[in-house]
Image (cartoon, rainbow, N blue to C red):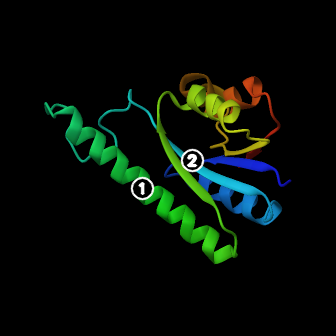
Amino acid sequence: MNSHVLVPIDDSECSTRALEFALEEYPDARITAMHVIDPSDVYRATGIESGSMANYEQIRKNHEANAEGLLESARRTADDAGVEIETDHVLGGVSRTILEYVEDHDVDHVIVGSHGRTGAGRILMGSVAERIARRSSVPVTIVR
């Protein structure tokens, strides 16, 4: 049976590189590109100004449209590589949701992009990739 590889994606170049790495290194695996919609990041990518009082439904729809755009881009990248992938988007805190997805969907390997921050930037921003690598029950490859 083929392994199941999870590639969390966002709108960064490093997540694109992670997907390209997965497609190149694991073309016969079941690859899932997944985007996490973080509810604590309400206004980013919604097109709604942060001071506006917008209803939840509008925010949710905007986040889902953004997620679908990212996943469509991932599908095109996979098509260009001649590899079929699955896509999914889920709502939750990014690191926790990725780790739960690993357990709930029989994932064998996570390939995640990293911005490669060091020093104060890493301390202040934290690292989703690092948290996943430290807490995952399956192997994690970090692509920079």
Q: Which of 31 and 38 is in front in this view?
A: 31
Are discs 2 and 1 less than 8 Å apart at CB? no
- Residue 136: x and y in percent read 75, 28
Is residue 127 in sight in this rendering? no
- Residue 67: x and y in percent read 42, 50
Identify the amino acid type marked 2. Answer: Met
Q: How busy is the neighbourhood of tag 2: few (under 14 within 10 Å), some, or many (20 plus)? A: many
Identify the amino acid type marked 1. Answer: Glu
Image position of 115 (left or right of 67)? right
SS type, badge 2: strand
Image position of 50 (left or right of 109)? left
Separation (CA) of disc 2 from disc 1: 10 Å
Q: Quadrant of residue 138?
A: top right
Give the residue at mark 1.
68
- Above or below 101: residue 83: below
Q: What residue is rendered at 59% in x and 29% in y?
A: 95
Furthest residue toward right: 1
Q: What residue is rendered at 63% in x and 28% in y?
A: 100
- Above or below 85: residue 89: above
- Residue 60: x and y in percent read 30, 40
Q: How busy is the neighbourhood of tag 1: few (under 14 within 10 Å), some, or many (20 plus)? A: some
Q: Earlier in the sequence, mark 2 or mark 1?
A: 2
SS type, badge 1: helix
Image position of 121 (left or right of 4)? left
Q: Quadrant of residue 117?
A: top right
Give the residue at mark 2.
34
Q: What residue is rendered at 70% in x and 30% in y?
A: 103
